[in-house]
Image (cartoon, rainbow, N blue to C red):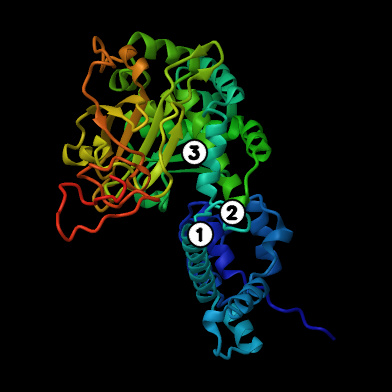
């Protein structure tokens, strides 16, 4: 007579609890069991019974068949594949030991898979860069770059989301506020909770109790945006999913990232409805701080929204926007102005976006001229820097907006200035792509140019070239 094998779901149960933003105590209360029993289940020290499986599925509205699928077989198969890596040649790990690792130590198995996955991706990226073929066929797809291209191809403008958001904004205004609209139209409460209750989340939807929980340590604009995000996901999900599915994206990670960014687009469109925002921007000279005051939005939220004003017949000034940290890592890139920016190799050190970290919170403006003679106007300042609460990280980034110089006279920051007459800073895309031979700020020589030996003379610029 065959014996039913016990079902262990420790890692999966832990992931589910964290995705729902629940403590062990909260999940135990929902399931009418003890917190210590939850802890034992998560450590695979107790099997999940059929009764508890049904209770989990009903309480959190989950697919029971999917929930009951064990991780161990999948872990064992994937670890066996990892062990075939030439790097691990000579290590004798029998199938029985692999199965034991996957069943008894799923957390260790997951750690091994993540580390090997990160190693494999980095190896591919290095190989792609050496060959100069980061986008070559067979290379590892970059989901971030793919989504950036998707947004750029659409000029960072999605009419269906803007139109739907404008309709919703009118409805919400009739109810006075988003929280009141949610309560009356959706039967959902909005509650602001301390960080320790939020379990490493700033927003989560408690489906079990029909309530949206938001971290009470967020500032007003962040609270407003998180609430708009929830409304966007619940009322525009079909439009968001359809747009993401219609994009030619390389993998599931890129699709997930596109959905997240489209939801953020929809949330911004709710907070700053297109027509009203465009009229305000034009009347106030695209003054980012002033627009933030009008719409209750942050500097970064307004800057991002300014890049989306591409409705045919009702366009705003085309802007490029970048957000980066003090180390130069780019975490947001939106191009509506045709400003060249290299995805690898850093940006020009003469662009003053990097100077903003020396003067936090202060706006920095600059006229720029590229080697081909094109001119741009840029404004930048830091965002963040204040931790949400004691013990939280103080993350500081710089946000820059760039527009073509011939559009700059419409900005409050450059009124009365002649773009052709002002002194502009000569910059390049980055050092490797810039052919300005006499630049003293150069970090590396431009690609494709032969260096001149400097045994008889040392130039002011870091490099001398044989063709000069």
Question: Is 23 positioned to the left or the right of 75 in the image?
Answer: left
Q: Position of residue 274 (x, y in %)?
A: 49, 17
Question: 337 above or below 398?
Answer: above
Q: Tell me which residue sits at (34%, 26%) in the image.
A: 373
Q: CA distance from mark 2 to mark 3?
A: 44 Å
Disc nearer the start of the sequence (2/3): 2
The mark closer to the camera, 3 or 1, is 1
- Can residue 210 be seen at all in this image of the molecule? no
Question: 434 above or below 32?
Answer: above
Image quadrant for the N terminus?
A: bottom right
Q: Quadrant of residue 468?
A: top left
Q: Tell me which residue sits at (43%, 45%) in the image.
A: 343
Q: Which residue is mark 1?
A: 131
Q: Position of residue 359 (x, y in %)?
A: 16, 37
| Residue 136 - label | 2
Q: Nearer the viewer, residue 371 or 4?
A: 371
Does dot 1 land on a helix, a strand or a loop? helix
The mark closer to the camera, 2 or 1, is 1
Q: Quadrant of residue 163?
A: top right
Q: Nearer the viewer, residue 171 or 239?
A: 239
Report if the CB atoms under discs 2 and 1 are less than 8 Å apart. Answer: yes
Disc nearer the start of the sequence (3/1): 1
Question: 253 above or below 187?
Answer: below
Q: Tell me which residue sits at (27%, 36%) in the image.
A: 351
Does dot 2 land on a helix, a strand or a loop? loop
Q: Which residue is mark 3?
A: 212
């Amino acid at each position: 007579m065959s014996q039913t094998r016990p079902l262990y779901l420790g890692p999966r149960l832990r992931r589910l609890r964290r995705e729902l933003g629940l403590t062990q105590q909260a999940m135990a209360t929902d399931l009418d069991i003890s917190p210590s029993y939850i802890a034992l289940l998560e450590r695979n020290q107790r099997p999940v019974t059929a009764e508890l499986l049904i209770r989990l599925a009903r309480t959190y509205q989950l697919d029971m068949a999917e929930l009951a699928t064990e991780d161990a077989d999948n872990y064992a198969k994937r670890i066996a594949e990892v062990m075939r890596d030439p790097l691990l040649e000579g290590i004798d790990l029998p199938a029985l030991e692999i199965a034991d690792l996957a069943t008894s130590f799923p957390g260790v198995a997951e750690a091994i898979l993540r580390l090997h996955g990160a190693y494999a991706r980095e190896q591919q990226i290095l190989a792609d860069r050496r060959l100069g073929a980061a986008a070559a066929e067979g290379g590892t797809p970059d989901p971030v770059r793919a989504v950036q291209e998707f947004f750029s191809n659409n000029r960072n403008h999605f009419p269906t989301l803007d139109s739907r958001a404008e309709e919703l904004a009118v409805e919400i205004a009739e109810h006075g506020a988003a929280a009141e609209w949610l309560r009356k139209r959706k039967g959902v409460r909005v509650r602001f909770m301390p960080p320790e209750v939020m379990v490493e989340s700033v927003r989560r939807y408690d489906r079990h109790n029909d309530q949206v929980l938001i971290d009470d340590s967020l500032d007003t604009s962040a609270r407003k945006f998180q609430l708009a995000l929830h409304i966007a996901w619940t009322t525009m999900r079909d439009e968001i999913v359809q747009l993401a599915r219609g994009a030619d994206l390389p993998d599931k990670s890129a699709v997930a990232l596109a959905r997240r960014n489209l939801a953020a687009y929809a949330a911004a469109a709710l907070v700053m409805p297109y027509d009203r925002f465009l009229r305000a921007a034009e009347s106030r000279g695209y003054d980012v701080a002033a627009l933030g005051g009008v719409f209750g939005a942050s500097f970064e939220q307004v800057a991002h929204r300014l890049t989306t004003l591409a409705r045919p017949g009702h366009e705003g000034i085309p802007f490029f926007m970048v957000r980066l940290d003090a180390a130069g890592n780019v975490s947001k890139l939106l191009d509506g102005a045709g400003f060249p920016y290299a995805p690898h190799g850093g940006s020009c050190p003469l662009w003053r976006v990097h100077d903003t970290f020396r003067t936090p919170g202060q706006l920095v403006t600059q006229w720029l001229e590229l080697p081909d003679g094109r001119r741009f106007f840029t404004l930048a300042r830091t965002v963040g820097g204040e931790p949400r609460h004691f013990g939280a990280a103080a993350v500081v980034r710089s946000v820059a907006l760039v527009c073509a110089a011939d559009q700059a006279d419409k900005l409050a920051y450059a009124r009365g200035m002649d773009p052709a007459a002002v002194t502009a800073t000569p910059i390049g895309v980055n050092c490797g792509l810039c052919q300005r031979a006499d630049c003293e700020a150069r970090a590396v020589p431009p690609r494709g140019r032969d260096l001149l030996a400097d045994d008889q003379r040392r130039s002011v610029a870091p490099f001398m070239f044989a063709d000069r």
